[in-house]
Amino acid sequence: MANPVLPSSGVLSPLGLDAVRLNPGFWGDRAALNREVTIAHCQEWEEREGWIGNFRGVRPRKGREFSDSEIYKLLEAMAWADHPALPALAETVAQAQEGDGYINTRWSGSRYTDLEWGHELYCYGHLIQAGVARLRMHGEDRLTQVAVRAADHVCRRFMEGTETCGHPVIEMALAELYRVTGTERYLEMARRFVERRGLPALADIPFGRAYYQDDLPVKQAQVFRGHVVRALYLASGVVDVAVETGDEKLLKAVEAQWERTVAGRTHLTGGMGSRHIDESFGEDYELPPDRAYNETCASIASIMLAHRLLLATGDVRYADLAERTLYNMLATGVALDGKSFFYANPLQVRVPAVPLEGVNHAAEGGLRSPWFDVSCCPTNIARTVASLPAYIATSSADGIQIHHHTPSEIRHGDLAVRVETGYPWSGAVTVRVVEGGAGRISLRVPAWASDATLAHGGIVREVTPGYAVAEGPWRAGDEIRLELPMRPRWTFPDRRVDALRGSAAVERGPLVYCAESVADEPPLGDLVARVAPPVEHEADGIVELEVEASLGAGDTPGWPYGAAPDGRPSGADVGLRLVPYHRWGNRGPATMRVWLPI
Ligand SMILES: [Zn+2]
């Protein structure tokens, strides 16, 4: 069962890379690009920057204190992609492991002297996740031995006491290692790390203990707060521990925190994180489009968490948010050529970025960069896209559930189906039975699909958001056809989102659209759009949209406040072209905005 997450109980069971294969299409093409281009790109940069050399003992050591984790995330990507470069890289890593299982190229010699910022347990977490991926895809080898020895070292060193790491991830890694090996001490160690948090377990810091979720015990928190990636990795580990120990209260606590966070701390794209200073959530409804941070890694963490909650509860809302985040954040994070990446993902860029050669020393998101000083996002994308088949479908006692509609082959028991679709450009999804079997086939109908239909056995019926169910048994050649309405639609913000008042965005299917202005096109600063049905333009299979707008030249500087409401726009009438947000920034420096003043 080749899955990044394989709970021993839950409403739904994931179907893994051995059960789901992506065919050419939106995600299948990206998975192929990831395997053929992105993985090698990451390895090349890790070599160039000296981060792999650190494991060979090259000194002085290069990179930030957590750079080991980038090699581990790359190894995880290689494991899911069954990439031929894995064994040699794993061998290099293994050289740096000490006799008692300790491994860290930064802190060897001064172990565990800075748990707040040192990232030692964080690095183990990613090493263990890589080991789990390798165990499930391949079986035991050098990499899995290194990971297991590291996990055993962690259990010996940290089982007693009150310590934990400033950056969560070890929790979900150990819980998963327990799932794959059955060794209970790994789960117990994960449970203790979760329990220690907020007692508090770490020192106070200028950002405050909320930064690393050490301000409150998990069960007492009402909402996700602090550093977004830390918060969501922790929550993912908490769900794993709750599911494996049967702690219903712990699971309910995370569900409630997720609900409030989605209600007030999530951008339209599914991105999370409004503050640059500490890469954190803002307060409820603090969702500025231009100052949005929305780290790519945070969106990946959100997908991981939503997937775990979906498996535990079967609630469609988790799959809905995962889809929003997949198409508008994960897909945005990497360029169409697979070789450059966004770290921050704002919803408005006022000034075109200046292209730069080489490493980006900042996270700001105006153009994708090939690599960063803190290069967590590229390898995170690589491992997530490599494991994407495991997020597509699930099974339960009564059949299979298809959560994400993309060309694929899905097998469960005797039943094998092929999903054919041009989604997200087209709303027609055909499920063909290739080998017959028993059970229901459930297809997710997204929350925005208000008049979808399902055709099956000669009957066409309307289906509502949630899951459209077709009853078996199935014979080869049977067909189900889901039609999702793909009309472009205007979306308006809650009035409490102060920064978005007076504006609206356009969505079509699962895609958020944006206006993009490249090169000598007029900038988008003085823009007013008219809320009327957008016109569709299709070229090379990509659907772009056009809305009516008034666009000013952006001149007349002066005092920007007055005694009366701002008057009618004085710009020229234009047909404003909107592109899918995930495609923006692929044509060079540009200004961009998702939310259009209306
Ligand atoms: Zn990142």
Image (cartoon, rainbow, N blue to C red):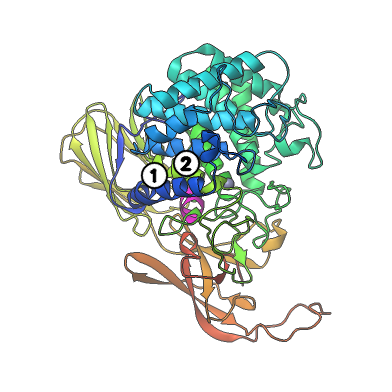
Separation of residues labelled 1 and 2 (CA atoms)? 8 Å
What is the x, y in percent for residue 107? 66, 30
- Disc on res. 319: 2
Residue type at mark 2: give it: Ala
* Residue drawn 38% across the image and 21% down it: 140
Instruction: Count the numbered circles shown.
Output: 2
What is the x, y in percent for residue 184? 52, 12
What is the x, y in percent for residue 179? 46, 20
Span of residues in magenta:
326-332
- The answer to whether residue 95 is left or right of residue 65 is left
Specify whether residue 148 is painted magenta. no
User: What residue is disc 1 on?
Assistant: 404
Specify whether residue 329 is painted magenta. yes
**On the rendered image, what quadrant is the C terminus found in?**
bottom right
Hey, which residue is sitting farthest right in the picture?
A: 563
Q: Depth check: give the residue in front, 307 or 192.
A: 192
- The answer to whether residue 537 is left or right of residue 345 is left
As helix, strand or loop, the secondary structure at mark 1 comes to loop
* Pointer 2 local density, CA inside 10 Å: few below 14, some 14–19, many at least 20: many
Q: Is residue 575 above or below residue 5?
A: below
- Disc on res. 242: none
Q: Main secondary structure of the magenta part?
A: helix
- The answer to whether residue 152 is left or right of residue 257 is left
Residue type at mark 1: give it: His
Q: Is residue 341 above or below residue 170?
A: below
**On the rendered image, what quadrant is the N terminus found in?**
top left
Q: Are marks 1 and 2 in contact (CB under 8 Å)?
A: yes
Q: Depth check: give the residue in front, 353 or 147.
A: 147
